[in-house]
Image: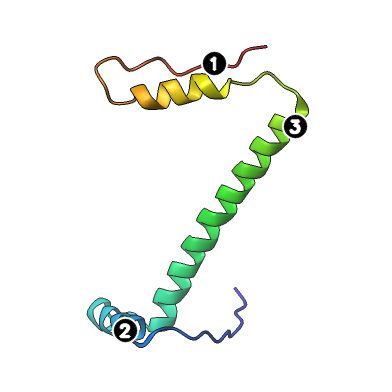
Amino acid sequence: MASKTITIRVPKELSDQLDRLALSMRRSKSFLVTEALASYVALNAWQVEQIEKGLAEARSGAPGVPQADVEAWVRSSRTLNERPKPVPKP
């Protein structure tokens, strides 16, 4: 895979932590930063994609779950009287 050099500025404490971690893991700082950045980008790309899908669905006029039903379900979560997951209403 081709690579590209980027430059970032980080707090000294973070840089020191990265130094220690790289030493203890016997990995380069570049390797650790690349792994962390790849994980961050993948997670956030997935989250943005899911938000965009949800917004598109909400705008489409498709059946949805009323906000009050969702709120009641969330409030009941992990209680003795937990409600079943609400289902979309036409």
The amino acid sitting under disc 3 is Arg
Q: Quadrant of the N terminus?
A: bottom right
Which residue carries the number 1 mark? Answer: 87
On the rendered structure, is 23 left or right of 34? left
Tag shown at residue 13 = 2
Relative image position of residue 80 (x, y in whole percent): 24, 17
The amino acid sitting under disc 2 is Glu
Relative image position of residue 73 (x, y in whole percent): 42, 21
Q: Compute the Cα span from label 3 to label 1.
A: 18 Å
Q: Secondary structure at mark 1?
A: loop
Q: Secondary structure at mark 3?
A: helix
Q: Nearer the viewer, residue 73 or 87?
A: 73
On the rendered structure, is 31 left or right of 59? left
Q: Compute the Cα span from label 1 to label 2.
A: 48 Å
Crowd around label 3: few <14 · some 14–19 · many ≥20 (10 Å): few
Which residue carries the number 3 mark? Answer: 59
Crowd around label 2: few <14 · some 14–19 · many ≥20 (10 Å): few
Q: Earlier in the sequence, mark 1 or mark 2?
A: 2
- Residue 7 drawn above or below residue 56: below
- Residue 19 drawn above or below residue 70: below
Q: Quadrant of the C terminus?
A: top right
Q: Nearer the viewer, residue 47 or 71?
A: 71
- At 59% from the left and 16% from the top, the residue drawn is 88
Q: Secondary structure at mark 2?
A: helix
